[in-house]
Amino acid sequence: MPTTSEGLLDLLELAREADAGSRIEHRDAIAGYGAAAIREVRPWLGDAALAAFAVRVIEKAGGADADARGLAIEALRGVRGAAFSEPASRDALDAVRRLGGALRPAQGTKREPTRRTTGPLPALLRGFGYRRRELREADLLGNIYSGISYPAAGDHACLFSGGPNSESYGYRDMPFGDNGYRYYGEWRGTRDMSYTGGNKVILDRSPNLYLFVNEGSGVHRFEGRFMVTGHETVVAEREGTIGEAIVFTLERVADEVQL
């Protein structure tokens, strides 16, 4: 375990003893220690008197040191739930977004898609929205327009569900239970679906199936990593033609995908 320098320990003591109005004066000096500073102030996130200061130190350290950025985002993501005050949770959420990360909303809160515009994706988090461009830049996609998109050399596939007029094209995707999803496979024209192309990839690359649901305006909400637990053919209509569609039964196996 890395040791903490005496200089950092002295600064931490000064900050702890300072009054709320002057404590911020120690932020930059402490944050200058990068990852070590993040590790030391992380426990302060649970202290109502020190949490706001800790959030600012962690954000400053993560923003100034690329090597510490991931550690900062991880620490700030943990500021949720009853153990933390609402102001600390809100400050941490804002800090994660400024650092270029995404944070899953606390249970019971309204979903709010994250619209990222710069920087690499540190992870895919359930409940947050991503644009196809971002996913392509993270090397997660093959054909950026496909409903089942995957890089040729990878071991995963991104499955896109919903969107304008999806039902008129024969798709009837829907969630079931807490972790299940019925996902219609890939059509090729108006013929019956077959276990080729993207449909074969779904079987081959399970359980690394990353499911996204269209929210409009080019944003797709990540629903987690899924595996195939079954599949069947059903009668479906596409563009006025009756045929057989393949429906995959998917089960969620993870809420988050580390990239």
Image (spheres, grey):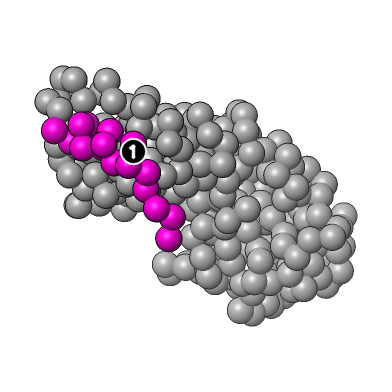
What residue do we see at 87% from left, 55% from top? 189
Q: Position of residue 150 (x, y in %)?
A: 78, 55
Three-letter amino acid code at disc 1?
A: Leu
* Between 13 and 174, the one nearer to me in the picture: 13
Q: In the rendered view, would you say 72 is above or below 115?
A: below
**250 above or below 108?**
below
Q: Nearer the viewer, residue 150 or 79?
A: 79
Single out the residue that lies furthest toward the front.
6
- Which quadrant, please, contains the N terminus? bottom left
Q: Where is residue 167 shown, x and y percent of the image?
A: 65, 51
Residue 111 seen in this snapshot: no
Residue 125: x and y in percent read: 51, 51
Residue drawn at the location 84% of the way across and 60% of the way down? 153
Q: Is residue 14 visible?
A: yes
Residue 186 as seen in the image, left or right of residue 212: right
Badge 1: residue crowd in 10 Å (few <14, some 14–19, many ≥20): some
Indicate yes or no whether the magenta region holds residue 241: no
Residue 133 locus on image (x, y percent): 71, 36
Q: Determine whether, in the image, residue 6 is placed left or right of residue 100.
A: left
Q: How many numbered marks appear?
A: 1
Please determine whether, in this image, residue 41 is positioned above or below residue 56: below
Q: Residue shown at 63%/53% (left/top)?
A: 259
The residue to which callout 1 is attached is: 8
Secondary structure mainly formed by the magenta segment: helix
Quadrant of the image occupied by residue 20: top left
Q: Secondary structure at mark 1?
A: helix
**Residue at horizontal 62%, vertical 29%?**
118
Res. 188 image quadrant: bottom right
Task: Give, as a single range, the part of the protein colored magenta.
Answer: 1-17
Between 86 and 43, which is closer to the camera in this rendering?
A: 43
